[in-house]
C-alpha cells in the first residue's frame, strides 16, 4: 500500500480509534458515571424528543385531514398550529383521564389490600396448621413459630408506615416529574412546529461533512425507521387499549376485585411484546389472591382465554405485519433488547430488529440482482 495522503489519513484514523477504544475499556466506570450524569441532565429534552415523535403520529393525520378540507373550501388556516394543539390536547386529556380514574381507585384498592392482608396471612396460617394436624410435634413447632415471629398488628403498622414514607417520597418526585414533563412538552411543541426546518438543518450538516452516497443511505434508513416505529407505536397503542377494555369488561362481569387497576396494568404492559401479558397476569393474580385464591385461579383462566383471542384475532388485525418479523426473530429481538436495556429495550427491540431486517433484506436482494442470480 502506497503512503499517499488519503492512506495516511486512514491509518491515523485507525490508530486514533484504537487508542480511544483502549482508553474506553480502561475507564468504563468513569464513562458510565459521566454518561448517566449527562443523560439525567438532558433527560427533559430526550423525553421531549420521544414525546414529539409520538405526538407527530396523530398530528400528521390531523394536519393531512385539515389540508384536504382546506383545499375543498379554499380557505387558509394555521394548519400546523391547530394540529399541534389538537394532538397535545388529546395527549393531556388522556393523561388527566387516566389520573382521575386511576388515583381514587388506587387509594381504595390500597386500603382494601391493607385490610385483607392480615386475614389472608391468618388463612394461610390456618391452612398450614390444618395440614400439620396429623403431625402433632410439627404442629406445635409451627404454632410456636407463628406466635414468636409473626405479629399481625405489627405487620399492619409497618405496612402503614411504609405507605406514609413512600407517599412523601412520591409527592417530592411528583413535583420534579411535573417540571420535567412541562419542559419536555414545551420542547416537543417547538420540535413539531419546526420539524421541516430541523430536518433540513440535519440534511445540510450531513451533506456538508459526509459523502453523498453515505448521506443518501442514512436518509433512507432514517425514513425506514420513522415509518416502522410509527406503525409499531400506533398499532401497539390501539391494540393495548382494546385489550384493556376487554379485560375491564370481563373482570366486571366476573366480579373480580381491582378490575380498573388490573385493566390499566394490562393496557400498559401490553406495550411490551410477548412478555407484557405474563407480567400483568402474575401481578393481577397476586393482588386477587389476597382477597380470594379461587378467584385468582379463575382470573388466570380468563386471562389465558382473552390472551388467546388477542393473539389470534386482535393483534394480527390491528398491528398486522408492521414489524415484518417471524415469531422466532420476534422472540430473539425482545430477549436481546430486554437484556441490554431492560423494559425499554423490550419495547424498542422489536422495531429496531425490523429495521435491521429490512436493511439486510434490501441489501441482499440488490447484491443478488447485481450478480444476476435467480433464486
Image (tube, helix red, strand yellow):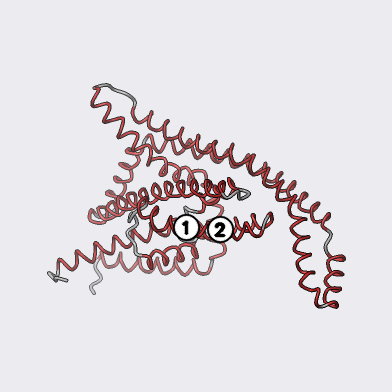
| Count of number-bearing discs | 2
Residue in view at x 59 percent, y 36 percent: 100
**Residue 59: x %, y % from top left:** 37, 37
Q: Do callouts 2 and 1 mark residues in contact (Cβ within 8 Å)?
A: yes
Q: Secondary structure at mark 2?
A: helix
Q: Measured along the vertical axis of the image, is residue 208 above or below residue 349?
A: above
**Residue 259: x %, y % from top left:** 59, 47
Residue in view at x 50 percent, y 34 percent: 93
Q: Measured along the vertical axis of the image, is residue 236 above or below residue 129?
A: above
**Residue 164: x %, y % from top left:** 75, 46
> Quadrant of the image for the C terminus?
bottom left
Dot 1 crowding, Cα within 10 Å, few <14, some 14–19, many 20+: some
Taking the image as shown, residue 224 lies to the left or right of residue 308, namely left
Residue in view at x 53 percent, y 57 percent: 302
Residue that extends furthest to the left in the rendered view of this protein = 372
Q: Measured along the vertical axis of the image, is residue 325 above or below residue 197?
A: below
Q: Secondary structure at mark 1?
A: helix
Rendered image quadrant of residue 195:
top left
Rendered image quadrant of residue 53:
top left
**Residue 63: x %, y % from top left:** 33, 33
Q: Which mark is residue 281?
A: 2
> Quadrant of the image for the N terminus?
bottom left
Taking the image as shown, residue 35 lies to the left or right of residue 176, namely left
Q: Earlier in the sequence, mark 2 or mark 1?
A: 2
Dot 2 crowding, Cα within 10 Å, few <14, some 14–19, many 20+: many
- The residue nearer to you, when weighing 322 against 259, is 259
Q: Measured along the vertical axis of the image, is residue 307 above or below residue 71?
A: below
Q: CA distance from mark 2 to mark 1?
A: 10 Å
Give the residue at mark 1.
307
Residue in view at x 48 percent, y 55 percent: 306
Q: Which mark is residue 167?
A: none
- The residue nearer to you, when weighing 28 against 357, is 357
Amino acid at each position: 500500500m502506497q503512503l499517499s495522503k488519503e492512506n495516511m489519513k486512514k491509518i491515523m484514523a485507525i490508530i486514533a480509534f484504537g487508542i480511544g477504544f483502549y482508553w474506553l475499556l480502561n475507564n468504563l466506570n468513569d464513562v458510565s458515571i459521566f454518561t448517566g450524569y449527562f443523560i439525567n441532565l438532558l433527560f427533559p429534552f430526550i423525553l421531549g424528543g420521544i414525546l414529539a415523535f409520538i405526538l407527530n403520529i396523530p398530528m400528521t393525520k390531523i394536519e393531512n385531514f385539515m389540508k384536504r378540507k382546506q383545499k375543498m373550501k379554499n380557505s387558509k388556516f394555521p394548519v400546523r398550529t391547530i394540529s399541534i394543539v389538537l394532538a397535545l390536547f388529546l395527549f393531556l386529556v388522556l393523561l388527566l383521564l387516566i389520573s382521575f380514574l386511576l388515583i381514587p381507585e388506587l387509594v381504595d384498592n390500597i386500603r382494601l389490600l391493607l385490610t385483607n392482608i392480615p386475614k389472608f396471612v391468618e388463612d394461610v396460617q390456618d391452612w398450614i396448621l390444618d395440614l400439620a394436624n396429623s403431625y402433632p410435634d410439627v404442629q406445635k413447632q409451627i404454632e410456636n413459630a407463628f406466635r414468636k415471629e409473626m405479629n399481625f398488628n405489627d405487620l399492619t403498622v409497618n405496612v402503614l408506615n411504609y405507605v406514609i414514607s413512600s407517599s412523601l417520597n412520591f409527592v417530592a418526585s411528583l413535583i420534579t416529574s411535573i417540571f420535567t414533563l412541562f419542559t419536555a412538552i414545551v420542547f416537543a411543541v417547538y420540535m413539531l412546529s419546526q420539524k421541516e426546518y430541523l430536518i433540513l438543518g440535519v440534511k445540510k450538516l450531513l451533506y456538508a461533512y459526509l459523502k453523498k452516497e453515505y448521506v443518501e443511505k442514512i436518509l433512507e434508513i432514517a425514513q425506514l425507521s420513522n415509518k416502522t416505529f410509527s406503525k409499531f407505536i400506533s398499532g401497539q397503542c390501539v391494540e393495548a387499549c382494546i385489550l384493556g377494555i376487554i379485560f375491564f369488561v370481563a373482570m366486571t362481569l366476573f366480579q373480580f376485585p381491582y378490575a380498573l387497576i388490573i385493566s390499566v396494568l394490562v393496557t400498559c404492559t401490553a406495550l411490551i411484546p410477548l412478555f407484557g401479558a405474563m407480567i400483568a397476569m402474575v401481578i393481577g393474580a397476586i393482588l386477587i389472591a389476597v382477597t380470594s385464591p379461587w378467584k385468582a385461579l379463575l382470573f388466570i383462566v380468563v386471562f389465558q382465554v382473552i390472551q388467546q383471542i388477542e393473539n389470534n384475532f386482535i393483534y394480527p388485525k390491528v398491528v398486522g405485519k408492521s414489524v415484518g418479523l417471524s415469531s422466532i426473530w420476534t422472540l430473539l429481538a425482545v430477549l436481546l433488547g430486554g437484556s441490554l436495556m431492560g423494559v425499554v429495550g423490550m419495547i424498542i427491540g422489536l422495531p429496531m430488529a425490523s429495521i435491521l431486517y429490512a436493511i439486510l433484506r434490501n441489501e441482499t436482494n440488490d447484491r443478488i440482482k447485481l450478480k444476476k442470480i435467480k433464486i
